Image (spheres, coloured by chain):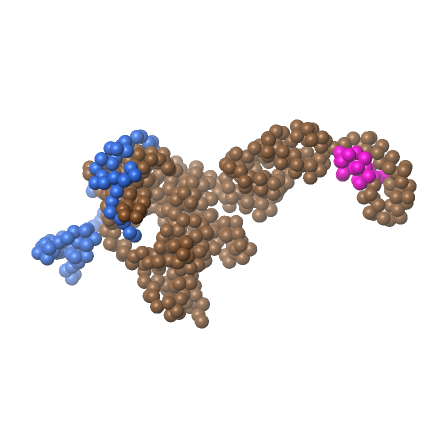
Amino acid sequence: MPSPQIDIHHVAKLARLALTEEEAAHYQQQLTRILGHIDQLSSYTLDAEPSAHAMPIFDVIRPDQDRPGFEQNEALSNAPRRAMDQFQIPKVIE
Amino acid sequence: MPKYILTIGLEVHAQLTTRSKMFCGCPVEFGAEPNTLTCPTCLGLPGALPVLNEGAIEKTILTGMMLGCTTPPVVKWDRKNYFYPDMPKNYQITQFDLPLCLGGGVPLYDLAYPKDAQKTIANPGKVVKLTRIHLEEDVAKSTHHDKFTTIDFNRAGTPLMEIVSDPDIDSAEEAVAYLNSLRQILIYGGVSDADMEKGQMRADVNISVRPEGQKELGVKIELKNINSMSAIRRAIKAETERQIDVLEGRNPEKLVQSTRRWDDDAGVTTKMRDKEDSHDYRYFPDPDLIPLRTESLVTRIRPLVPELPHEKRARFESDYGCSAYDADVLASEKELAAYYEAAVAVNTQVPAKKLANWVINDLLGLLKDTEGGINACPVKPEALSELVAVVEAGKISNNQAKEVFAEMFANGGSASNIIKAKGFEQVSDTGALEAIVDQIIASNPEKVAEVKGGNEKAMNWFTGQAMKASQGKANPKIVTEIVRKKVLG
């Protein structure tokens, strides 16, 4: 199996991380080792159902009932800026 | 010039009618003051944990059942990672590989097509195949101002059902029919109010064009920002033309997989971004949420599946003798169908088909300009049934009945009271009518001779005279009978 390569710059961009070249090289090495580990796991044939969670727990749900949450002021208390009772942020152009 | 094949797939987001949000107990409300329906979970504060809303899950499974989907035995929720200010956690909780519903289809109803396209339906009775339905959280609402953007988190975390179709739609008209039919079904099931103008139902359109003869689909381009049924049709037409222009070299752009925005005022689509590959979202199972086994939910919800519009339509045709068109109109709205059935049930002697005519031709016409629709209708089913019974018995004429109906609609009241008040009660007393007819015969021997000579029109003259003599109160059916009997002897 060819050793997997990770595109560290692409991953850093997706995660909004500004890495120096040294950091990039460092993480590249570490993450490549992790991928190698996953490849090693994939090489085993396991007689088990794929699981969706680390623990065998299911069905934690709540009835559809509403309850009051934050007051408006409380909700906005961490906002760096406010305008019109809303969180104000730099203009977003989509 | 080669012909082109248009292929469309739709992703429809529908807001569910739940009391609380998807992962927290904040109320779901439309039009509340900004940022008054939030808590640590839907604001994405550190340490807050999500818990699944049972009501939202039930409504999604019910939707799947109405559309013939299957529900996998175990479902789970995943994180879709991307950065946008309307999503405070920097990931959206959604379902990746184990959604609540798989497969299924949406039947396209004739009246769901745009009005001008109903006469030329290319594939009558078509069922558009579905890929899946999954349940996720909605994002916050951003408002873009001149110099900045503001965010209201009231909508953040409200339950949102995404219904994904196969690329199985062949025209803009079919896309409209798909949305209208789907909307009817969602409303029938009480799962969503599905009003596009209020943003309760939103559609993204995947659209590709390929020359006839080419097997593989053309480049897929996604259209966003479409807010109404009529805009969907315009957007698809404009984007189809643009893609054909590119394929034929009239437009120097290239077709690349991308997302475009529809500008309804300008009537053009403009590029928003190249489509990120699916793996760029780095989906992974949300460790804060526990997988769900669906078997007991499925057993519990199965009996809640309502009679669907097309089933109701078929029953109206077979049980009530409605025409296909009438049945389609009556079944298009759950409340209207209920009103009609209530009127039919009042008195089984009243022909159901006649009631259908009154509802469609008279009631719907007046309701068009009334707030609140059929639920606020001032004419109760009992009153309509009574009126139609009176007309059918020949006690008042059709024109008089319309007048009575208009009065009932304007001021309420029962048919019999209004008929009395207006003096519309017809004289059906044969003795009184015979006397009138005898009188006319005696004083018009020349007309009697005409009738005997074979002039049918002269017969109508007698009926007219008798009606006049009774000041319009005579029952025309009975008068005609008496005239025929007496004159022809």
Instruction: Give me the residue at 37% from left, 46% from top.
Output: B13
Q: At x 35% / y 55%, what residue is drawn?
A: B261
Residue B299 visible in the picture: no
Q: How many marks on residues? A: 0
Q: Is residue B27 magenta?
A: no
Residue sitting nearer the eye, B93 or B232: B232
The residue shown at (65%, 34%) is B404
Residue B177 falls left or right of residue B431: left
Q: Residue furthest front?
A: B146
Residue A74: percent from left, percent from top: 24, 33
Picture coordinates of residue B127, whole percent (x, y): 46, 52
Magenta range: B464-486
Q: What color is chain B drawn in?
A: brown
Q: Camera-side residue: A51 or B432? A: B432
Q: Residue visible at 29% across and 58% down?
A: B274
Report x, y in % for residue B52.
30, 37
Considering the image in quadrants, where does the C terminus of chain B appear?
Answer: top right
> Foreground: B475 or B53?
B475
Q: Position of residue B89 (x, y in %)?
A: 23, 43
- From the image, give the main secondary structure of the stretch colored magenta: helix
- Asked if the magenta segment contains residue B484, the reply would be yes
> What hue represents chain A?
blue
Q: Is residue B414 visible?
A: yes
For the N terminus of chain B, the image quarter is: bottom left
